[in-house]
Image (cartoon, helix red, strand yellow):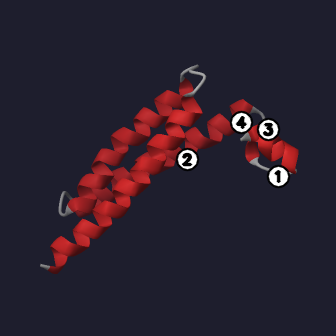
Amino acid sequence: TKHADAIFGYHTLPNTFKKTVVNRLIISLLVFLILNSILIVMKKGLTGIMSYYYLSGILIFIFSAFLLVSNNKNAKFYTLNILRFWIFIGILAMLFDGIIMKW
């Protein structure tokens, strides 16, 4: 999509900065998410589905960061799809956590 963004004149991060800068930015955001998930699990404990979502999210974010560090050609594609799927799982976790808490 970088080339399509350049054709249509969109100013996105990959078009503005180099690939290494964008990778470092994404990895630093993933590290922030890892630390945030650790703090939430430590503060709330393992109560409810959302706590297990955050706990398993730590592993997903670590895997995504290692995938970006590797020199795989399709690393960003895989990472993007893994994180999209993880957002979907988070929506389901919120739904089921709300249902369970209500009963």
The image quadrant of residue 40 is: bottom left
x%, y% of residue 86?
A: 40, 50
Quarter holding the C terminus is bottom left
Q: Could you tell me if the residues under marks 4 and 1 are in contact, i.e. CB atoms within 8 Å?
A: no
| Label 4 SS | helix
Name the residue located 25 percent from the left edge and 58 percent from the top edge.
Answer: 51
What residue is pinned by disc 2?
A: 29
Sequence-wise, the earlier of marks 3 and 1 is: 3
Residue at horizontal 47 percent and vertical 49 percent from the top: 84
Up the image or down, 66 lies above or below 43; here it is above
In the image, residue 63 above or below residue 88: above
Q: In the rendered structure, which amino acid carries the disc numbered 2?
A: Leu
Mark 4 surroundings within 10 Å by alpha-carbon count, few (fewer than 14), some (14 through 19), many (20 or more): few
Residue at the extreme bottom: 102
- Return the residue found at the far top: 71
| Amino acid type assigned to the residue bearing label 1 in the image | Tyr
Mark pair 3, 1: CA separation: 10 Å
- Height in image: 68 above or below 7? above
| Disc number lying in front (2 or 1) | 1
Q: Earlier in the sequence, mark 2 or mark 3?
A: 3
Horizontal side of 72 relative to 12 (left or right) equals: left
- Checking the image for residue 10, the label placed there is 1
For the residues carrying marks 4 and 3, which lies nearer the camera in this image?
A: 3
Closer to the chain start, of discs 2 and 4, is 4
Name the one closer to the observer, 94 or 65. 94
